[in-house]
């Protein structure tokens, strides 16, 4: 398959917990993942929150601390590099951490489709703020993330859908088990080339055009460097006499 000419390419990256694993943030479904020992129904649903809000807050506060102490890794930085080089770029991340932003990816090139762990919002109305109870309606405040059984933010869906309205030259799917139908749909829709970066097989593997079975912090920087080197060589050849 022809190599992608980055400067002319529309590039979509989709990331999940695996990209932050090497920064020391646990994934959800792996052998040391959260859902191995913890019950998602108690910690990541509106019903769980209604039943025991302090337990839920305790878990989210712990995760906030862990994320604050973590640093972006080489894979987060490679995404920024890719975004700078591409004609058009969008990252759809399922991660609620801020490591993509701290690596230097501008906000307008990124959608945190499952929300932002550092946001605090009302569990009833749309008030946001760092208080225990909503100043507008008195309901309990909750973390600004998407829980199981909840809908995605339609404004965020629009950003992704608008990007996908035109063909995508390169889609990278990194560190996600791709358990949600919308992730598989977005990864495959209108894409000419789909590369999966993940040490393990996933629900997307058989739709991918290429698979790199390595940790993201190794495979992704190398992929981006190689692509840039090939693009530079092709640009030189263009002006060589035959
Ligand atoms: P998962 O924990 O389901 O999957 C993490 C993926 O990362 C797995 O496929 C691993 O094989 C892979 N992985 C592990 N280490 C890696 C590494 N160093 N480099 C690359 N890949 C690696 O996490 P997500 O797919 O992000 O949602 O989970 C999706 C959603 O389910 C989360 O956003 C969260 C969760 O429940 C909600 O809470 C709503």
Image (tube, rainbow, N blue to C red):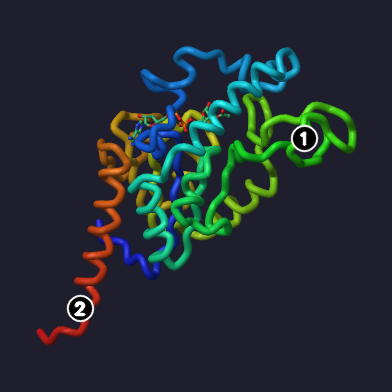
Task: Answer with left or right where residue 52 lies relative to residue 60.
Answer: right
Closer to the N terminus: mark 2 or mark 1? Answer: 1
Name the spot of residue 155 as percent of width and height, x first.
69, 49
In the depicted structure, whether residue 110 falls above or below residue 48: below
Q: Quadrant of the N terminus?
A: bottom left
**Which numbered disc covers residue 131?**
1
Residue drawn at point x = 54 percent, y = 52 percent: 110
Query: Is residue 50 or residue 156 the one in the foreground?
Result: 50
In the depicted structure, whether residue 53 falls above or below residue 1: above
Q: Secondary structure at mark 2?
A: helix
In the picture of the structure, the residue carrying the numbered disc 2 is 236
Residue 121 lies in what quarter of the image?
Answer: top right
Q: Residues within 10 Å of mark 2 (few under 14, many from 20)?
A: few
In the depicted structure, whether residue 88 falls above or below residue 240: above
Residue drawn at point x = 38 percent, y = 59 percent: 82
Query: Looking at mark 2, is its residue's CB closer than 8 Å to ligand 1?
Result: no
Residue drawn at point x = 29 percent, y = 32 percent: 199
Residue 236 lies in what quarter of the image?
Answer: bottom left
Task: Answer with left or right where residue 136 lies relative to residue 118.
Answer: right
């Amino acid at each position: 398959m022809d190599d992608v000419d980055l400067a002319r390419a529309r590039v979509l990256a989709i990331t999940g917990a695996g990209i932050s694993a090497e920064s020391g943030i646990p994934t959800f479904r792996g052998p040391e993942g959260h859902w191995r020992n913890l019950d998602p129904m108690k910690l990541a649903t509106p019903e769980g929150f209604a039943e025991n809000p302090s337990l839920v807050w305790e878990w989210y506060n712990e995760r906030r601390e862990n994320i604050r102490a973590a640093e972006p890794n080489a894979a987060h930085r490679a995404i920024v590099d890719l975004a700078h080089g591409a004609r058009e770029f969008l990252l759809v991340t399922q991660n609620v951490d801020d490591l993509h932003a701290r690596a230097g990816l501008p906000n307008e090139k990124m959608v945190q489709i499952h929300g932002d762990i550092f946001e605090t919002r009302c569990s009833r109305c749309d008030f946001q703020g760092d208080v225990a109870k909503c100043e507008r309606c008195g309901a309990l405040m909750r973390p600004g993330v998407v829980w199981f059984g909840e809908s995605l933010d339609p404004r965020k869906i629009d950003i992704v859908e608008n990007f996908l309205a035109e063909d995508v030259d390169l889609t990278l799917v990194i560190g996600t088990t791709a358990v949600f139908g919308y992730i598989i749909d977005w990864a495959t829709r209108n894409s000419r080339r789909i590369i999966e970066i993940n040490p393990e097989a996933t629900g997307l593997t058989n739709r991918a055009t290429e698979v790199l079975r390595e940790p993201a912090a190794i495979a992704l920087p190398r992929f981006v460097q190689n692509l840039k080197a090939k693009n530079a060589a092709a640009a030189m050849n263009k002006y060589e006499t035959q």
